[in-house]
Image (tube, rainbow, N blue to C red):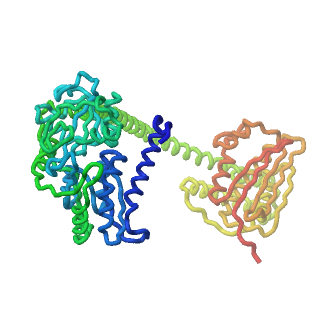
Amino acid sequence: MTKEQQTTPGGITRAVCACAFALFHLLSAETHASVKDQPTVRLAVVNTFGNNFSVRYFNGTVNAIAKSLDGRRLIVQLYNQDEYLKAAKENKFDLSIASSGLTAVMMDTLGGTPLLTLVHARTPNPNKANGGVIIANAKNGNINSIRDLKGKSLVVMSKKAFAGYMIPMHELERQGLNPENTFRSITEAREPMTRLAEKVRDNEFDVAFLASCVLENMEQEGTLKPNEIKVINPQNSADFYCQHSTELYPGWILSARSSLPATMVRKIVISLLGMPVGKSNGEYWTIANDYQEMNTLLRRMEQREFMERDIPWLIRRYKYYILSAVFFLLFILANWMYLAYAVRKRTKELKDTVEENLAFERENLKIKDRFESLQRVNSIAMISTMVAHELKQPLAVINNYAEGLGRRITKGRFKTPQEILPIIEEIRSEGQRASSIIDLVRRFGKKDKHERQTFDLGDLTAETVDMLIRVGTLTTGYELKCGKNILVTADRLNIEVVIINLIKNAVEACRAEASPMVVISVSAKDQDAEIIVEDNGPEISDEQFEKMKFVGNSTKKDGLGLGLAIVHELIEAHGGSLVLKRKKEGGLICVVRLPRCEEKE
């Protein structure tokens, strides 16, 4: 080992790895198999004493086992106490070498059979070959007896170690101390016991628990000087030549799991019993026949872990868990109280909101009732005004013809009765139209379905223009452009009313102009029939144009604002549309579209 490896953590790690690697090859070197797929026997060794000692101490045992395996390959694996029990649970070995207590714990839970017990020159009695050692730094004058351990820091290999934890703890209890509260702290180093002795020597911890004979082995190797460590509560026992602080129990045990054939177990036992005594430590395998003290100790340790404790002990042992539980319960309680408050507050808010919504709904119903009442009154007023609006034209014609007829009869201008008939026919025709208008208005008020028929829109427009000329309504210049065979299915009188209103509005809008002109055109536009009435009246402002969209608003001085409203209602009832456009130079363009029928052949 180099100087660097001796003084740095990295060097120590590399040294341990190199030693473990050497141990593995050393323990496996004498095996008879060299083929990877050859049957194997797995041996587990608990590495309590450190790698160097394990190499020397178990070399002869491994060689003897390997020679008795009938050609099977032997695989050796080192474990600490915790790893050993985990490997046993996972069935990772067939044979094991461990302390008697650890072996007993393994067999009690996972099964197995104790075969032989290992003894050596310092521990010749197999029933009394293992004990615990309580050590402290030799220079620490505050620790001289078991009683002085109270409040000190303790380091152990593992709490599952038999000689390195269970036996010394039992000794403390046997002498009247409570193992649970004796030490200020207990640290599981999970390192070989040789390292624990070094930690106490270097004052990293006050006390350590070791297995018996570890100190002697370290002094023999030169890793520990006799005056560096002192044994607390030293004991003297016959046939036991290692320092110890406790009672003695059976030594290390070779045990076999059920995975190993019985014939092979027999050969292994015979081979180990016939193995010569070791040269360095005088070790050899024999049979222990007294496990009563060990079993009693294990039962007491188990009872000490699970027996009932008083309330102060429970509080001391589990005080952090209790505090955590109390804080958790307080948190739950606070959270519950907050949620209850939030729920009550939210419920009140929802209740208030529901009440507000109900009040709002009741107010809406009242407003709706008032609105419907006003709507009915407005509809009645609109229908009444519509009657007056639409009947004005035929009644005016009838009055004109009647007055003219009366004057001509008075003056004796009619020579024959036949001359009177055309005038009477005109009066009769206008009377029928007035009656039709009344029927139209009644249907409009009741929202009845209109009687529809298919007709040529161009012909109807030309006839309406001719009638307006005859009765003196179309008094401005006009231009008529009507396409042929433009068919629609509609109420003929309704469409006639639409055309009359549009032309009358156009005439009234441009009458004051120097050269008033109304242009009427009928054409087919895609799937629709289109009527366009255009005038050259004055420019229309934005405000006036917006008013045209509402019922009751008119741009004429004496207008009622119903002409376009009537047109809009009638056109929409036929699935059509009315669009108003302003001309830049002044005037208005009214565009009416109606669904067009297929042309006649």
Farthest residue toward the top?
A: 141
Q: Which residue is drawn at 40% across and 55% down?
A: 24
Judge whether residue 196 can be spotted in this image.
yes
Find residue 271 and report its horizontal and vertical position in percent. Answer: 25, 65
Vertical side of 32 occupied by 312: above or below: above
567 vs 62, left or right, is right
Vertical side of 246 occupied by 265: above or below: below
Find residue 213 and report its horizontal and vertical position in percent. Answer: 24, 42
Vertical side of 48 occupied by 59: above or below: below
Q: How many marks?
A: 0
Which residue is nearer to you in this view: 248 or 330? 248
Farthest residue toward the front?
A: 279
Q: Which residue is drawn at 40% across and 69% down?
A: 33
Vertical side of 441 occupied by 259: above or below: below
Q: Which residue is drawn at 67% across and 58% down?
A: 576
Which residue is nearer to you in this view: 390 or 130? 130
- Residue 174 is drawn in which quadrant? top left
* Image quarter of the C terminus: bottom right
Which residue is nearer to you in this view: 574 or 121? 121
Q: Which residue is drawn at 80% across and 62% down?
A: 523
462 vs 552, left or right, is right
Judge whether residue 340 can be spotted in this image.
no
Which residue is nearer to you in this view: 399 or 513? 513
Find residue 566 and report its horizontal and vertical position in percent. Answer: 65, 50
Farthest residue toward the bottom?
A: 601
- Residue 490 is drawn in which quadrant? bottom right
